[in-house]
Amino acid sequence: MHIGLIGGIGPAATVLYYQRLVAAFGAAQLPLSLTISHASIEDLAAHAKADDRAGQARVFARHLAALEGAGCDIALITALTGHFCFDETQALAGIAMLDGVEVIDRFCAAQCIRVLGLLGSPPVMSSHLFHRLNRVQTVVPDTGLDKIGEAYMALARSGTCSDDQRQMFLETATRMVEVQGAEAILLAGTDLGLAFDGHSLPFPVIDAVEVHIQSLLQEAIDRGAGGEAET
């Protein structure tokens, strides 16, 4: 199976996807065939803020056409923010797409998680992940949401996380667990691994990147793997 990623949104998260795909497919002793099409985080941020679903879907469609031309069998948008226009994008796609929100929804149901706290971009948090989670109740920060969203976007653009940003995310997540009733925290921004990787956290965390990687791995197993070259 040849995997296509719409990456660059942000760049650090794209590197993380690549590293984890290599590790996961290597551990499973499966060949990895992968192509990445680089998208603009600024275009996505502007379209998501304006809720311009058709505009961003057209952007993604160009990347999907390139991935299809490279021989990809399935594609993933490597940003949960990018799923604000998933339906519109899927309607324009010439190849299969992994729904990055749907697989998280199924994962939460399998883990019997009833209340999920969301950390991510401003559109992700303000819309409760675009109201696309149907099997779990969600909560978002009840104070300082704009400031938290701005900190996340700064992290996504720079590919680095300061100690102050990390502390803000940690305190926000802890409040969602201890005050707002979240049973787990979803890193609903795929760059948040930069904040928490290597840190022990006092609450359950669901890493969207890892859920996506395992879903792609299972797709490859179900399809019989296949593919040779890495682009």
Image (cartoon, grey):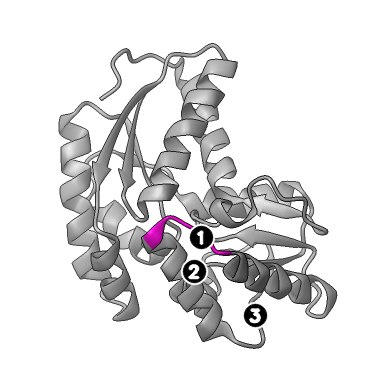
The location of residue 221, given as percent across then percent down, is 52, 20
Mark 3 nearby-residue class (10 Å; few <14, some 14–19, many ≥20): some
The furthest residue to the front: 163
Task: Give the mark, 2 or 1, whose residue is nearer the N terminus.
Answer: 2
Against 33, is 9 above or below?
A: below
Residue drawn at x 33%, y 27% as measured from the top left: 34
Q: Does the magenta stretch include residue 113?
A: no
Query: Dot 2 lies on which element?
Result: helix
Residue placed under numbered mark 2 in the picture: 152
The location of residue 213, given as percent across then percent down, is 52, 36
Against 15, is 183 above or below?
A: below
Magenta residues, as a range?
158-162
Residue 196 picture quarter: bottom right
Query: Dot 3 lies on which element?
Result: loop
| Real-space CA distance between mark 2 and mark 3, rounded to the nearest whole angstrom | 13 Å
Against 210, is 60 above or below?
A: below
Amino acid carrying label 1: it is Gly
Res. 83 visible in picture: no
Task: Give the mark, 2 or 3, whose residue is nearer the N terminus.
Answer: 3
The quadrant of the picture occupied by the C terminus is top left
Res. 20 visible in picture: yes
Amino acid carrying label 3: it is Pro
Residue placed under numbered mark 1 in the picture: 189
Q: Do the residues labelled 2 and 1 touch (CB within 8 Å)?
A: yes
The location of residue 23, given as percent across then percent down, is 54, 24
Labelled disc at residue 141 = 3
Query: Dot 1 lies on which element?
Result: loop
